[in-house]
Amino acid sequence: MHLTTFGMDREIVMGLDLGTRKTHVCVLRDGERLEEFAIPTDLEVFRARFGARDRCRVVMEAGKVSPCVSWLLADLGYQVFVADSRRLPTNMRGPYKNDKNDARFLATVLEDSNGRLRTIQHRCRKTLENLAVIRSRDELVRLRTAMANSLQGICATHGVKIPRASTGSYRTKILPAVPGELQSALTPMIESMDQLTRSIRELEASIERISQEQYPVTTVFRQIKGVGPITALAFALIVEDPSRFARNRGVGPYLGLVPRQEQSGPYRPQLGISKAGDPLLRRLLIQCAHHILGRFGQDSDLRRFGQSLMKRGGKSAKKRAVTAVARKLAVLLLALWKTGEVYEPLRRARLFGEISEVA
């Protein structure tokens, strides 16, 4: 049977509660349950089971497997909605939460929403493939750091201090300093660290190649001293489309770099940032902010702005300044992306003669 023979029944809605092993499905029409079943979370099973059904509207929550499932169902001709888990009406969920009821809840929300369901748009396949290179490199760096810390701790218990060494010279500089009785135990760890370093360098070369061939806008980002190839590509991939932000300042809340709010009358507590959005890009921007405010940072509007915040003093002055600089850096990157202008480190200082201290 060809896919084109299937119509779209808009009266039927299907809720999918996706799990890593099993997916629960609930099919509704006018609030009446037509069907409920569970199937393995396997793309071939999904293709066989849903390829033979009449097409309808489908809703699922955003999660680990929702991108590939939503792509598959969309290719089969379904109208797919990926619900934002944080914006679902929890008052409709009821007191009995389980996988079966969650599928029923999602179908009910889609049926009753009348187009008001808050949904998200998954990134395209190519973007996620390129993001996997950055995330893989990030995990390898974390693993190498954990091994280096463990190595220092083991040697410290034997009264030996491991010398400083660059990432490519563990075997030549660190191995000779390891006590003889620990050589057989720690040599495999040191060799693994060297192998991790080689793998990290290969991934970094891939990041440079992807940036040059597919994302030339990263060259615009790297005009800012402190923004390297990894942060530039991560920003391009995660933001993906600069026109999604009507105002450049909207990228700050999108990346979770603005304070949470819990105001009630005169009660206005100072809270930390919301930490919404992608944690990897947020961490990379924070690292860039540390460089901008550090001893090797270039004199710029961003640096002067951060320094003015630190001068206010207080227990967390530097921490707040770093976060504020990271937020302004994200806004600046988005502005450069939209305009393609040449970056001027002291543009605001040139225009106004001084840097504003207002975040």
Image (tube, rainbow, N blue to C red):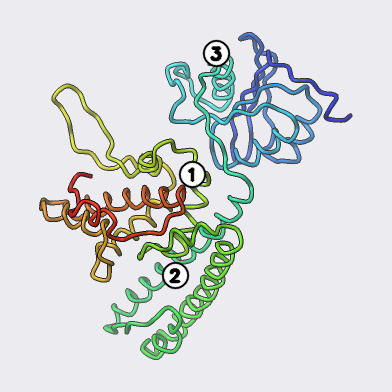
Q: Identify the residue shown where x is 64% and y is 21%.
A: 26
**C-alpha span from label 1 to label 2:** 34 Å
What kind of residue is marked 3? Answer: Asp
Q: Is residue 30 left or right of residue 224?
A: right
Residue 150's x, y, as percent? 37, 71
Q: Is residue 262 left or right of residue 172?
A: left
Q: Quadrant of the N terminus?
A: top right
Label 1–label 3 contact, CB within 8 A: no
Which marked residue is nearer to the observer: mark 1 or mark 2? Answer: 1
At label 3, counting other C-alpha atoms closer than 10 Å, the crowd grade (few under 14, some 14-19, many 20 or more) is: few
Q: Which mark is residue 112?
A: 3
Tag 3's secondary structure?
A: helix
Q: Is residue 206 left or right of residue 230?
A: right
Tag 1's secondary structure?
A: helix
Mark found first going from the N terminus, 1 or 3 = 3
**C-alpha span from label 1 to label 3:** 32 Å
Q: Quadrant of the C terminus?
A: top left
Residue 6's x, y, as percent? 81, 23
Above or below, 102 relative to 250: above
At label 2, counting other C-alpha atoms closer than 10 Å, the crowd grade (few under 14, some 14-19, many 20 or more) is: many
Above or below, 144 relative to 307: below
Q: Nearer the viewer, residue 98 or 298?
A: 298
Instruction: Provide the residue designation for mark 2.
Output: 144
Mark found first going from the N terminus, 1 or 2 = 2
Residue 138's x, y, as percent? 47, 61
Q: Which mark is residue 213?
A: none
At label 1, counting other C-alpha atoms closer than 10 Å, the crowd grade (few under 14, some 14-19, many 20 or more) is: some
Mark found first going from the N terminus, 3 or 2 = 3
What kind of residue is marked 2? Answer: Arg
Tag 2's secondary structure?
A: helix
Q: Which mark is residue 242?
A: 1
**C-alpha span from label 3 to label 2:** 50 Å
